[in-house]
Image (cartoon, helix red, strand yellow):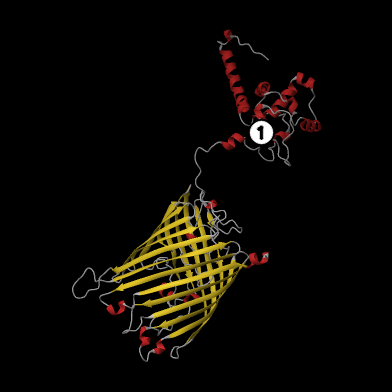
Amino acid sequence: MAFALDMSHMTSTHTRSVLRSAAVCLAPAIILVLSPVAAEAKKPAAAEAKKAKPAAAKKKAAPSPSDTKKAKTADKPAVVPSSAAWEAPPREGETPPAPSPPAAETKPAADSAPAAATAPAESPAAPPQAEQPPPSPPPPPPEEETLPALIPPAPTQYVEHLGPSAYPGNGPSGGRSWWPSPLRWGPSAFPGMVRGLSGGSLWLEPSFHGLQWPYMTKSGVGISGSAWVDTAYEEITRDNASVANTTLYLQQARAVLRVTPTYVSGRFFIQAQAELVANGCQTNGTYCADSGTVNTDDLWLRVGHWNIWDLKVGRFEGWELYHTGMGLDINTIERRGAWAAPSSPFKSPDYYGVSLLHDRPQGIGLGYAALHGYIANILRIELLAELGATNVDSSGQNVWGGRPAAILDLGWVKLKAGYEYEKRTHGTPTLTGAKVDDDGFRQTFEGYGGAVQFVFDPYVEFGGNIARGSQTYTNPQDAASASKSSFTTTSVGGFANLRVGSLARVHMLDDLLLGGGVNWTTWYDGYRVGSNDVDYAGHLQLFGAIQYLLAKQLFIKVVLAYARSDLDPSASHDPGNGAMNYSNTMFSTRLRLMYLY
């Protein structure tokens, strides 16, 4: 069809009015043609246009529903008009849209545009089924999916379940690839590197061998924690007729709720952590009376880049450098060992494992700051500083110290070493008549030690430790106690854990672990009577353990322990004081149920 416009008639008012009316009528049709739903709108309009054209009716009569179905099947490979190129075909099993003329009779976009333009906006003769919406809208064009958002979405906020497995790639591999790749970053850089046997003591090591735990890849809040209940029995025999023996039944419990809000942008992160602790009364007798049954473990802030560096400030534990295995857990009866009677001049010594600044700071105004560095995925460094006061009144002592530590972790072998130093002075000097700024009180402690650990997953893990620490006490106001408060402690020990199922090749026993360990500690101070030897104590601790992980969730562990402490006070070497030199022997059994979440 062709149109010729005579410009001589364009000047009349009637003609201009007609053209304006035509433009107004044609505008919706033009917009409809250019819109994304033009294809759906043109189908009924094209059908009405074909019915109105005699030429089209002569070529082919309107198809019946059965003919339409056949035509759709036959013309499936036909080219779709360009104006509807974005429309996806019906999915398999999906109800097709309302019947439409065969694709073979669909005119190109250039010919169909005028037909759509001449069709009214709403066609009363359109088939009823064409007005019904399809069962599901067609998918958007591929171009729309790939368009970038003009405004970046807000970071996803979520709550993540943490726990010991929250560091992917550094959990149990269950395989035999024990060497890490020093050329890759992130948790995936440790595909075969293991913390230890899954569920074993190295796997549960609280500092995660220096790894940045909790590791979170998105902004959100991490929730984790633990709960355990111990039921135990011990008996202590003392080979001194004047000191009573001990038989003790004990149950104690502890639960921790850990909350870790985290902001993450790429590898940069800001993180905080608080641990709320609910205590059953534990073995250091006055613990509940002094601290109450609810208190705090961790309370810190940390900022850094994942697997590069971070700075942590607040209350937390330093990296572990002395590992005891599946026994000698903190605040347990086998950890306390063969303790001496209250009448003894000194107690049986606890082991020393570069642990003065490993443990959380004790004091109202005392805290830590630690800078961590991560080099080539295998070397981790901690520079921990201690600063503050033990109390904020006149009894408070000013404290400062440091603890550098390093861990070389090759997966199958881990080397750990560290040194610590602490110094204390009086915040308010003790007056001796005249006012002084310094009363001469000094208490210094320094120690060092290290460990080597081997992990051959999933079969066995074992290791050894050695550490030595000394305290020097100077107090001009109380010279008598100075020698007793200056002492040296040396500890050496080892452990081994094995997985029964892997060694016996019995899959149903894969969650069964056996473990054992030994620890020997010597302690002596600077106090002596006359020419006698100084005060001395030795403490031997052994244990065996069996553990089963029920439903991959509940740890059930039984620990059998033996301990012997030898007490040799300097005064016992005087005539008539031989009874002061005696030994304590302990046997104990402990059942622990522990759940990590």
The answer to whether any part of residue 402 appears in the image is yes
Determine whether, in the image, residue 174 is placed left or right of residue 371: right
In the rendered image, the quadrant that contains the N terminus is top right
In x, y percent, where is residue 33? Answer: 63, 26
Viewer-closest of 130 and 486:
486
Residue 552 in the image, given as x and y percentages of width and height: 61, 64
Task: Report which residue position mark 1 lands on.
Answer: 87
Instruction: Work out which residue is located at the far left of the displayed protein and give it.
Output: 434
Residue nearest the viewer, comparing 545 with 131: 545
* Mark 1 residue element: loop
Q: Quadrant of residue 288?
A: bottom left
Q: Amino acid at mark 1?
A: Glu
In the displayed structure, 343 sits above or below 211; it is below
Which residue is found at the position 35% from the left and 64% from the top? Answer: 401
Q: Quadrant of the C terminus?
A: bottom right
Which residue lies at the image location 49% right of the left edge and 71% below the top edge? 493
Left or right of 176 on screen, residue 183: left
Q: Position of residue 538 (x, y in %)?
A: 44, 78
Residue 469 or 289: which is nearer the viewer? 469
Q: Is residue 316 visible?
A: no
Query: Could you classify mark 1 by the number of other residues whose Cα lies within 10 Å: few (under 14), some (14-19), or many (20 or more)?
Result: some
Nearest the viewer among 493 and 434 is 493
Rendering coords of residue 26 (x, y %):
61, 22
Q: What is the residue that sits farthest to the top in this orientation?
A: 8
In the image, residue 196 sits, relative to residue 524, either above or below, namely above
